[in-house]
Image: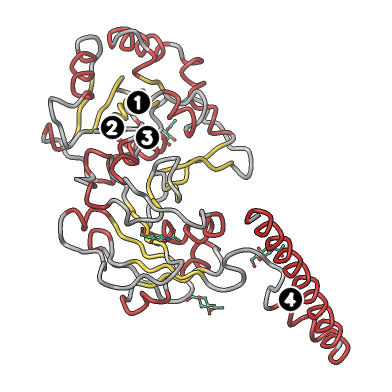
C-alpha cells in the first residue's frame, strides 16, 4: 500500500515538474518576443553579449589564475593582459596578490617551496565554491619530497606527465610552417663520437653505470661540473654540435620525464640523442620519429656502442636521424607565465569536480 502511494506521489511530482518546465519555457518565449518586439535587433545583440546560450564554463569572462608565490622566488611582470599579449591566449588574467584569493578560479602552488617549508597552503581561508587548487611541479617523483601530507587538497595537476590536467612538457614538436631546408652534410663539423654534459654525477644513477660500460667500447667526451670542465651556456650548443651523438641521460628514470637534455641540448645542438629515461614508448609518444637512439633498444650497452661506431661511418644512415627537421621544429616551454596561461586554454574541459585523494600515488604511478 505504501509503495503504491509513493508511486502516486512520484507521478504527481513528475507531473508538476513538467508543468513547471512548460510554464517557464512559455514565460521565456514571451519575454524574448516582448524584448525583441520593443527594441528590435538591439535586444538580440545584448543576448549574444551575455552569452546566454553558451554553456562553456568560463563564457566570455576572464578566468583568474592566482599564483600564490613565484617558483624559486623568480618574479616576472604580470602587467597588462600577459596571456594575450605574449601568447595570444584570450580571457586569462594572471595575478599574484593574495588579496585576489576570493575571486580566483584557480590558485597555483609550486611544489618545491611547499616541501621546503618556505611557503604554506592557505588552509585557514575558506575556499570559494568552484575554486580549484593546482599542484605544480616539473621535478621527477624522486625530487618531489613526501607528498603524503597533500592528500585531498588539490583539484588539478600541472606537470610534465601526459596524464596531468595541464601538461607542461619541457619541449614539444610543432609543425614547420614552410618545409625546412635540410643541411647538406650533417657530419661536416663533427670531431667527437659521443659527448656527455653532466653536473650532478652520482655513481648509483643508472646513467652512470651505462656511461662506464659505454666507455669500455667507445670514447666519450665529458663536460660539466663533474669533470671540472663546466661549459658557459654560450658554449653548450656549439660544443654539442661537434659531436655525432649526445648522451641525453636523465638523472631520474620516471614516466614521461624527458627534459631539456633532449629538447634543447641534443635537438638544438644538432647531435643525435642517445636517450636513457622513461620507456621507448614514452619517447615515441612525444619525440620525432627516427630522431633518437634508446639505450633499452639494445641487448647490451656494448651492442649500443658498436651501433654508434657503425652509424657514424655511414653518412647516409646517420643523416636520416635528421630528416624530421623538414617537417618539425622544437618548441620549448620555459616561461612560468606561459605555463600559467595554458590553464585557460584547457579550463573549460577540466572535470567539474576532482580531488587528488592520493597525490603521492598519482605522482609515483607508472
Ligand atoms: C562559447 O564561448 C566561447 C568563448 O567565448 C567560444 O569560443 C565558443 O565558440 C562559444 N560557443 C558557442 C556554441 O557559441
Ligand atoms: C581580462 O583581464 C585582462 C588582463 O588583466 C584585462 O586587460 C581585461 O580588461 C579583462 N577583461 C574582462 C572582461 O574582465
Ligand atoms: C660548420 O661550421 C661552419 C662554421 O662555423 C658553419 O658555417 C656551418 O653551418 C657548420 N655546419 C654544420 C652542418 O653545422
Ligand atoms: C577541490 O578540492 C576541495 C578539497 O578536497 C574540494 O572540497 C572541492 O570540492 C574541490 N573543487 C573542485 C572544483 O573540484
Q: Quadrant of residue 275?
A: top left
Q: Is residue 73 left or right of residue 137?
A: left
For ligand 1, which image quadrant applies? bottom right
Task: Out of 170 and 306, give the one closest to the viewer.
Answer: 170
In this rendering, the answer to whether 255 lies above or below 88 is: above
Q: Position of residue 57 (x, y in %)?
A: 58, 65
Q: Which mark is residue 262?
A: 3
The N terminus - image quarter: bottom right
Between the C-alphas of marks 4 and 3, the distance is 47 Å
Q: Earlier in the sequence, mark 1 or mark 4?
A: 4
Closer to the chain start, of discs 2 and 3, is 2
Determine contact: label 1, label 3, CB under 8 Å: yes
> Mark 3, residues whose alpha carbon is within 10 Å: few (<14), some, or many (≥20)?
many
- Mark 4 vs mark 3, foreground winner is 4
Q: Secondary structure at mark 2?
A: loop
Asked if residue 169 lies left or right of residue 3, the reply is left
- Residue wearing tag 4: 48
Quote the CA–CA distance across marks 4 and 2: 51 Å
Tell me where residue 136 appears, x and y as whole percent: 33, 53
Where residue 29 sits, quadrant-wise, is bottom right
Give the secondary structure at mark 1. strand
Along the polypeptide, which appears first: circle 4 or circle 2?
Answer: 4
Residue 250, numbered circle = 2
Q: Mark 2 near mark 1, Cβ–Cβ under 8 Å?
A: yes
Q: Which residue is mark 1?
A: 275
Query: Of callouts 4 and 3, which one flags the residue occurring earlier in the amino acid sequence?
Result: 4
Amino acid at each position: 500500500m505504501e509503495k503504491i502511494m509513493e508511486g502516486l506521489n512520484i507521478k504527481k511530482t513528475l507531473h508538476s515538474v513538467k508543468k513547471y518546465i512548460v510554464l517557464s519555457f512559455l514565460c521565456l518565449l514571451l519575454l524574448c518576443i516582448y524584448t525583441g518586439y520593443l527594441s528590435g535587433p538591439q535586444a538580440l545583440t545584448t543576448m549574444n553579449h551575455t552569452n546566454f546560450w553558451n554553456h562553456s564554463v568560463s563564457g566570455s569572462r576572464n578566468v583568474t589564475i592566482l599564483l600564490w608565490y613565484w617558483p624559486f622566488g623568480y618574479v616576472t611582470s604580470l602587467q597588462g593582459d600577459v596571456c594575450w599579449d605574449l601568447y595570444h591566449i584570450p580571457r586569462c588574467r594572471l595575478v599574484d596578490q593574495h588579496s585576489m584569493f576570493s575571486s580566483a578560479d584557480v590558485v597555483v602552488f609550486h611544489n618545491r617551496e611547499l616541501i621546503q617549508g618556505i611557503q604554506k597552503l592557505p588552509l585557514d581561508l575558506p575556499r570559494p565554491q568552484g575554486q580549484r587548487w593546482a599542484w605544480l611541479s616539473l621535478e621527477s617523483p624522486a625530487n618531489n619530497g613526501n607528498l603524503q601530507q597533500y592528500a585531498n587538497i588539490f583539484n588539478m595537476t600541472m606537470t610534465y606527465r601526459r596524464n596531468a590536467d595541464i601538461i607542461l612538457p619541457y619541449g614539444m614538436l610543432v609543425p614547420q610552417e614552410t618545409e625546412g631546408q635540410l643541411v647538406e652534410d650533417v657530419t661536416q663539423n663533427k670531431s667527437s663520437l659521443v659527448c656527455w654534459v653532466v653536473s650532478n654525477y652520482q655513481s648509483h644513477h643508472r646513467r652512470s653505470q651505462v656511461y662506464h660500460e659505454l666507455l669500455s667500447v667507445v670514447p666519450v667526451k665529458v663536460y660539466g661540473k663533474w669533470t671540472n670542465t663546466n661549459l658557459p651556456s654560450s658554449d653548450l650548443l656549439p660544443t654539442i654540435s661537434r659531436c655525432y651523438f649526445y648522451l641525453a641521460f636523465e638523472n631520474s628514470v620516471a614516466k614521461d620525464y624527458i627534459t631539456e637534455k633532449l629538447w634543447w641540448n641534443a635537438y638544438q645542438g644538432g647531435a643525435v640523442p642517445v636517450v636513457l629515461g622513461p620507456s621507448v614508448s614514452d619517447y615515441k609518444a612525444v619525440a620525432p620519429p627516427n630522431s633518437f637512439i634508446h639505450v633499452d633498444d639494445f641487448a647490451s650497452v656494448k651492442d649500443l656502442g658498436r651501433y654508434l661506431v657503425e652509424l657514424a661511418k655511414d653518412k647516409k644512415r646517420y643523416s636520416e636521424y635528421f630528416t624530421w627537421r623538414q617537417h618539425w621544429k622544437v618548441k620549448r616551454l620555459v616561461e612560468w607565465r606561459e605555463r600559467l596561461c595554458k590553464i585557460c586554454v584547457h579550463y573549460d574541459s577540466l572535470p567539474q569536480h576532482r580531488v587528488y585523494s592520493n597525490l603521492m600515488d598519482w605522482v609515483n604511478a607508472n
